[in-house]
Amino acid sequence: MKIAPSILSADFGNLERDVKAICDAGCDLVHIDVMDGHFVPNLTIGPVVVSSVAKCATKPLDIHLMVENNTFFVELFAPLKPEYITFHIEEEKHPHRLIQKIKSLGIKAGIVLNPHTPPEAVEFLLQDLDMVLLMSVNPGFGGQSFIESVIPKAKRLDALRKKYNPKCLIEVDGGVSNKNIEALKDAGVDVVVAGSYVFNHASKKEAIESLQI
């Protein structure tokens, strides 16, 4: 299991310290939640802050766009050369075109599904995707409770990706902890985003290791 701690739960007054801490603790990706206050009722960070994160992070960036006008934000963040940029299918009218654009910039492309969106929504996009991110909370805020229905949803997505593109990763974001990590692994999940569980733990290394099953 790959671990991508979300810096949404970090101490923004000591962001460099916290980013270095999760990288030193053995995370695989640094998850960046970009919210515009329109697609979700919260406003987070832009490319100026993320560029500072990129300078101190020793692990690749995983940028999750929760925004309107996805293409505009892809162009803003692409110069930072993240490993992944993921966007919500609920907001994008031309998802295949945007996938092609992200890949043309040398970045891996992913689609995000809100809790209510079925995995079949990406069935005919899977062959071009590097990742599908399943939200296991309602997007917008950290610290929410895990939505259990993501487990059968991940299983359905796992069956689809085995059919169309076995190399496509399944990522889950929201309420992840050592209490549900085994069920997520059994459902076929490859990457988990863990924010408050990692950053609120007395030892970030122990928290991350408890998820690396």
Image: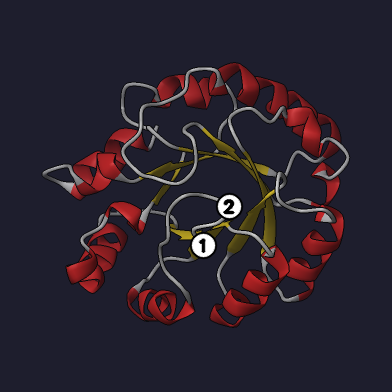
Image coordinates of residue 162 in percent, x first then y, are 77, 31
**Element assignment for label 1:** loop
206 sits to left or right of 50: left
Q: Are marks 1 and 2 in contact (CB under 8 Å)?
A: yes
Q: Which mark is residue 48?
A: none
Q: Which residue is mark 1?
A: 36
Image coordinates of residue 30 in percent, x first then y, are 41, 60
Q: Amino acid at mark 1?
A: Asp
Q: Is 23 placed above or below 79 here?
A: above
Residue positioned 53% across, 61% down in the render: 63
Work out whether residue 15 or residue 26 is closer to the camera in this orientation and state it.
Answer: 15
Residue 135, by quadrant, is top right
Q: Around disc 1, counting alpha carbons within 10 Å, would you say few (fewer than 14), some (14 to 19), or many (20 or more)?
A: many
The residues tagged by marks 1 and 2 sit, at their Cα atoms, a distance apart of: 7 Å
Residue 26, by quadrant, is bottom left
Work out whether residue 104 or residue 44 is closer to the camera in this orientation and state it.
Answer: 44
Q: Is 28 placed above or below 83 here?
A: above
47 sits to left or right of 118: left
Hey, which residue is sitting farthest left in the picture? 202
Residue positioned 29% across, 52% down in the render: 9
Image coordinates of residue 46 in percent, x first then y, are 46, 73
Residue positioned 27% across, 43% down in the render: 196
Q: Is 140 placed above or below 116 here?
A: below
191 sits to left or right of 19: right
Q: Amino acid at mark 2?
A: Phe
Color scheme of the displayed model: secondary structure
**Element assignment for label 2:** loop
Residue positioned 24% across, 40% down in the render: 207
Of the 4 image quadrants, the one containing the C terminus is top left
Work out whether residue 57 or residue 119 is closer to the camera in this orientation and state it.
Answer: 119
Image coordinates of residue 141 in percent, x first then y, are 39, 45
Q: Which residue is mark 2?
A: 39
